[in-house]
Image (spheres, rainbow, N blue to C red):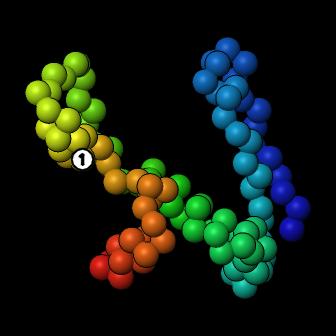
Amino acid sequence: MSPSYGAPHAEGNPEEKEREVVPIYKYKTFEEAEAHLKELQPSDPLARLKRLERLLRTLLPRKPIQRGLFRFRTLEEANRHREETQPLLIRDLTFSQVLLILQQL
């Protein structure tokens, strides 16, 4: 189960140079592939949760960003606008709030 690497990237395109080279593993059986997948996953549950969060963030469609300057008459009006336009970030929530959100899913 040794990795083989893909073809080298094109020298002329700078975007191709920045891409990460991912090893390609070859397996003889599906069980061997499952066993290796378990080895690749981090054993720490928090690290797995962070990886899952990163994956979910990439899969979710992004909210459009409002451009320009905004003028507000009161601080409450500015805070209301921020709550409506900023996405909900998991890192800003407490653990109990995260549990409540997960229970709703």
Q: Is residue 33 visible?
A: no
What residue is pinned by disc 1?
83
Q: Is residue 33 left or right of residue 73?
A: right
Q: Give, as a three-letter code, the residue at label 1.
A: Glu
Q: Is residue 54 visible?
A: yes
Q: Residue at x 11, y 27 (%)?
A: 73
**Residue 83 locus on image (x, y percent):** 24, 47
Q: Is residue 76 above or below residue 103?
A: above
Residue found at the far right of this picture:
2
**Residue 20 locus on image (x, y percent):** 70, 39
Give the camera-side residue of 4 and 41. Answer: 41
Give the camera-side residue of 87 and 96. Answer: 96
> Quadrant where the C terminus lies?
bottom left
> Quadrant where the N terminus lies?
bottom right
- SS at circle 1: helix
Dot 1 alpha-carbon crowd within 10 angstroms: few under 14, some 14 to 19, many 20 or more: few
Which quarter of the picture shows residue 25? bottom right
Q: Residue at x 59, y 61 (%)?
A: 51
Residue found at the far bottom of this picture:
31
**Residue 33 locus on image (x, y percent):** 73, 76
| Count of number-bearing discs | 1
Give the camera-side residue of 102 and 55. Answer: 102
**Residue 8 locus on image (x, y percent):** 77, 32
Q: Residue at x 66, y 65 (%)?
A: 47
Residue found at the far left of this picture:
73
Q: Is residue 44 left or right of residue 103?
A: right
